[in-house]
Structure formats: C-alpha cells, structure tokens
Amino acid sequence: MSATDPVTGHPMSKQRLRLWLHMLKTARFVENELRERMRVTYQSTLPRFDVMAMLDRTREGLLMSQLSQQLMVSNGNVTGIIDRLVQDGYVVRVSVKGDKRATLVRLTPKGIEKFAEMAAEHERWIDELMDNVQDQDIEHFIDALNHIRKDHQHD
Amino acid sequence: MSATDPVTGHPMSKQRLRLWLHMLKTARFVENELRERMRVTYQSTLPRFDVMAMLDRTREGLLMSQLSQQLMVSNGNVTGIIDRLVQDGYVVRVSVKGDKRATLVRLTPKGIEKFAEMAAEHERWIDELMDNVQDQDIEHFIDALNHIRKDHQHD
DNA sequence: CAAATATATTTCAAGCCTAAAATTTTGAGC
DNA sequence: GCTCAAAATTTTAGGCTTGAAATATATTTG
C-alpha cells in the first residue's frame, strides 16, 4: 500500500501520525498555559494577543482581510475580536479613503503601550515553558516544522 | 538578564519564541486542513474525532472526567461534545453502579464502525500532509517535542 | 448519625471559531 | 451611465472552549 520504514518495518504513516499527535499535545499544553497566564495577568486572551502582535508590527494599520489571512483564521472571527479590542480602547477602526468597503485597523497609543508590556511577559513565559529546548536543537526543530508546510503553503 | 546564544549572541528567549511561533503556525495549518476534510467527508469535527479515538482505545468506556483529563480540555466542554455524539448514535452514556454521580461513556457498535472508517482516512490525511517529513527526522522531532513538556507534565 | 467536605457532572455566560449568507462598494464591460 | 461580477466586511447559526456556579452524590469527620 505505501512506504515502510526500512528499520522498523512500520508504515511511515503510523510514524507521521505519532508525530502529529505529539505535536498536538505539546502545542495544546503550551497554549493552555499561555491562555491561563494571559487571563490571570492581563484579563485577556491569546487571540487578542495575536491580533495585537500583528498590528504592532504594522503601525500604519492593517485591513481586516489582511489580519485574518495572516492569522489563518476566518474573516468573521476577526470582526468579533476587533470589536472587543475597540471596546477596551486598544484598537481603532479607520476608514480607508478611496475605498468605502475596506477598514483599516490600528493600535491606539494605549494599545501600543499595553502590548509592549504583554509581549515582554509573553516572551518570558515562552522562555520558561521551553527552557528544556537548547539552542542547537532549535534550528533543526524549526527546519522540520517548515518542512511540513513546504509545498502546501506559501507565506 | 538571561542566557545568550554563544553563536548568534541573541538571547535564547528570542529563539524559543521563534520556535513557538513556527510550531503554532504549523499546527494551525494541519488542524485547519484536517478540520475541513472532516467536515466535508464526514460532516464531523476534530473534537468529536478526538473523543471517539479515546473511546475506541478503551472499549469498556471512560468516565467524563477521564475523558476531559486525557484530552486536556474542560469538563463542561466534553459534556457538549458527548451530547452531540449521543444524538448521532455513536456513543452511549451508561450509569456506573455503585456511584450515582459518575457516568461511563462508550462507543456504540455504530460508533466503533464509523470510527474505524474515519481513523483510516485520518491517517492517510496526516501521511499526505506530512509527506515532507522523513523517517530519520521523526524520532528527533518527537524527542524535541517531549523535551518541551518534560518537568512540566506527567502523563 | 449529622455536618462538612470532596467528587462527578452539568449548566451558564461569554468569548472563539467556522462556513455561508447578506450587505455594501468597487470596477469592468458594454 | 448601467449592469453585473468581484471584493471587503459583517452578520448569522451552530459548534467548541473556558471558568465559575449549581446540582447531586459520596466520603470523612466530629
């Protein structure tokens, strides 16, 4: 039916499935930790943090469609998250002159300041959660991850 | 403040953050693909598949609390997913004699059959999505993943 | 045994997420 | 200018997810 591992004789698909399950479990573990810390420390969420991170990298602002594309989430989803960030005063919607359909979304000064604080803490959390991963491993690890998406995605 | 990489001079925390972002992106990509295929092919979802996979491994059934613990999701969450699986006739709730608080959850014959079909297809999907990952890499990859959870979790 | 505490589960409110439909605006082709 | 397809966004319905409160039962302790 398909390729088998020359050493173990197991089908490759079983190995890849095992890899995927481990990856899922690890990602879930880290995400659960980060979510909880975001909640307790900042009364915020990971999706909100992700959106703010994108906006922080492009201070001129981003279109709703650019946001959802970059974050790999649906359009409608971003609408709700931005609604709440606007309510909290971290983000503003700015109309795009020349195209009444589009909306530009930007961090407010308050949002920029808050994000800086959160990002620094977020980085410390990751550093702590991953303190078992040593530098020489990291590049190989990232290579392997990119390998998975190669041929499928173009970012 | 913290350790720096001897080669690049960058703080380790930046490297780890980069690793985490790549991992998140890759996991999200695979999950999005799988979700879509589950939806189109089986009119089902990944969370339902995960629950059925757990139940398939323990045919005598599992307690709600065991399910939520193993899957690393909340109690209330599992309640809803089981509700829908019961509606579809894939799962039954069985009362535990000797403890009226607890509920055992089991796959029905229909559920067992359906899961076998879905699992086979699921494995093929993973195999296809990860066809860039070769066998010699996989064990290192899994090691690195487990390294992250080490000292934090005990499963 | 009664009271308090712990355990198993469900319910609830709120946020996240998706696909699909609806809305509004833009841009081509006529 | 009109018509129609494409584009940007929001809305909607339904499922997933959480933490916290509620419910019911079991166990421990005084």
Image (cartoon, coloured by chain):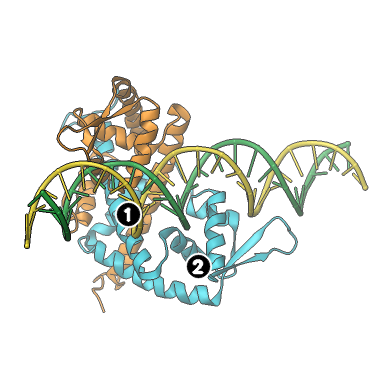
Chain colours: A cyan, B orange, C green, D yellow
- Asked if residue A53 can be seen in this view, the reply is yes
Q: Secondary structure at mark 1?
A: helix
As drawn, the label of residue A57 is 2
The quadrant holding residue D5 is top right
- In space, the residues marked 2 and 1 are separated at their CA atoms by 22 Å
Which amino acid does the dot numbered 1 rest on? Ile
Does residue B37 sit above or below D8 in this rendering? above
Q: Is residue A121 left or right of residue B4?
A: right
Q: Which residue lies under the disc numbered 1? A: A142
What chain letter is assigned to the residue under label 2?
Answer: A
Does residue B103 sit above or below A141 in this rendering? above
Q: Nearer the viewer, residue A78 or B7?
A: A78
Image spot of residue B134 (x, y percent): 28, 39
Which amino acid does the dot numbered 2 rest on? Arg
Q: Residue at x 27, y 58 (%)?
A: A138
Q: Nearer the viewer, residue B75 or A146?
A: B75
How many callouts does the rendering have?
A: 2
Image spot of residue A1 (x, y percent): 29, 21
Image spot of residue B59 (x, y percent): 20, 27
What chain letter is assigned to the residue under label 1?
Answer: A
Q: Secondary structure at mark 2?
A: helix
Image spot of residue A126 (x, y percent): 30, 64
As drawn, the label of residue A85 is none
Q: Is residue B73 left or right of residue A61?
A: left
Q: Nearer the viewer, residue A41 or A99?
A: A41
Q: Residue at x 39, y 69 (%)?
A: A42
Query: Is label 2 or label 1 in front?
Result: 2
Does residue B47 sit above or below A125 in this rendering? above
